[in-house]
Amino acid sequence: MRIFDKVIHYYHENLPFVVYRKPNKNTISSFFIVDDELHFTNKFIESGFVFAPFNTDEKSILFPVEKSECLTEEIDLENVNSDENTFFVDENSKENHLKIVEKTIDKIKKSNLKKVVISRKELVNISNFDLLEIYKKLLQNYKNAFVYCWYHPKVGLWFGATPETLLNIENDVFKTMSLAGTQVDNGQLKPVWKSKELEEQQLVTDFIEHQLKNISTHLKIDKTETVKAGNLLHLRTRVEGKLSEKSDLKLLIRALHPTPAVCGLPRNLAKDFILENENYDRSFYTGFLGELNLDKKSSLFVNLRCMAIKNKTASIYIGGGITKDSKAKNEWQETVSKSKTMKRVLK
């Protein structure tokens, strides 16, 4: 495939690129940048591919259309083995995560916080790094996710297979979703959701409705449904509406990001708690990425189930929503389950 050949060439030449496939599509798209200059956006009025961090105080990186060669191709993948790999889990990481989750539960019970998303970073050594093999495995394993490989020599190499849409907008009509609650897919026809997950999902949906009601019209909220993402199940509620005349894309993005599904509620309190207590930099994990203002359309996804790779070491990012009813050991196990999304494509 021409795109895959260019990916390898650009990576070896230390030139920026992104290759991605939207959920349930049979085509991959790409941006190949002609130089290694860093471009940024904060107004979201440009056209290109945006890669935005969790912390809204930091800059969002833009691959501008006018600086890019943009290609799209049909996917034609040969079978790539994806064996279930076994990886050692760092017990220090476990103890640290249990401690911060306990601290978070205690804080929620004693404050106005209702939910905080606590995450961690797990390091995995890669014996034989093969960029294309990893990306092809992600494409094969996660057909209903936004699957990408993003590289800039001044920033780093990222992979992801995210199940969560932040926003789709065409002209002034937008669609978004609330996605929360997690359990392992055991093949059950009608999975049973506990009150903790149902409450967590409702908090996210209520937040989105509150954030959008003053900047949009014709707001419609669908019934909550169960969706599958890799080896996991989630609760999802679709939301759509029309942007009001006095609103714009930046206002819409700032209203939604970071969502309670990756941050918490109240949002500012949860964000402050995260930045003070997680003890590591999330970077682009739980940020967002995707097409910006291409043919009057934007298609943005929350950067979940992702990893950064440097010097044959993968930094895998995983987290979960904490409420007053959370159990620390269960929350730890949820992060272990989520980490398998990335681990199963590594050697």
Image (cartoon, rainbow, N blue to C red):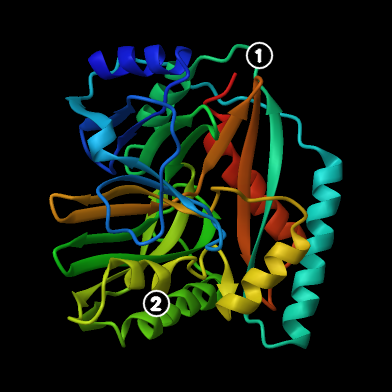
Q: Position of residue 64 (x, y in %)?
A: 30, 41
Residue 222 in the image: above or below residue 188: below
Residue 14 in the image: above or below residue 315: above
- Mark 1 to mark 2 CA distance (whole Å): 43 Å
Front residue of this view, candidates 323 and 156 = 156
The quadrant the C terminus occupies is: top right
The residue lying at 28 percent from left, 67 percent from top is 249
- When asked about the image quadrant of residue 307, the answer is top right
Q: Type of residue at label 1? A: Ser
Front residue of this view, candidates 324 and 66 = 66
Counting other residues with Cα less than 10 Å from the Cα at mark 1, is it few (<14), some (14-19), or many (20 or more)?
A: few
Numbered disc 1: secondary structure: loop
Q: Position of residue 164 (x, y in %)?
A: 40, 55
Numbered badge on residue 142: none
Left or right, 128 with respect to 167, comes to right
Counting other residues with Cα less than 10 Å from the Cα at mark 2, is it few (<14), some (14-19), or many (20 or more)?
A: many
| Count of numbered circles in the view | 2
The quadrant the N terminus occupies is: top left
Look at mark 2 in the image and give the residue it sits on.
Answer: 208
The residue lying at 80 percent from left, 45 percent from top is 93
Q: Position of residue 117 (x, y in %)?
A: 62, 64
Q: Type of residue at label 2? A: Ile
Q: Earlier in the sequence, mark 1 or mark 2?
A: 1
Cβ atoms at labels 1 and 2 below 8 Å apart: no
Front residue of this view, candidates 57 and 182 = 57
Numbered disc 2: secondary structure: helix
Left or right, 110 with respect to 270, comes to right
Asked if one can make out residue 81 in the rendered structure from this viewpoint, the answer is no
Look at mark 1 in the image and give the residue it sits on.
Answer: 127
Front residue of this view, candidates 181 and 71 = 71
The residue lying at 38 percent from left, 37 percent from top is 147
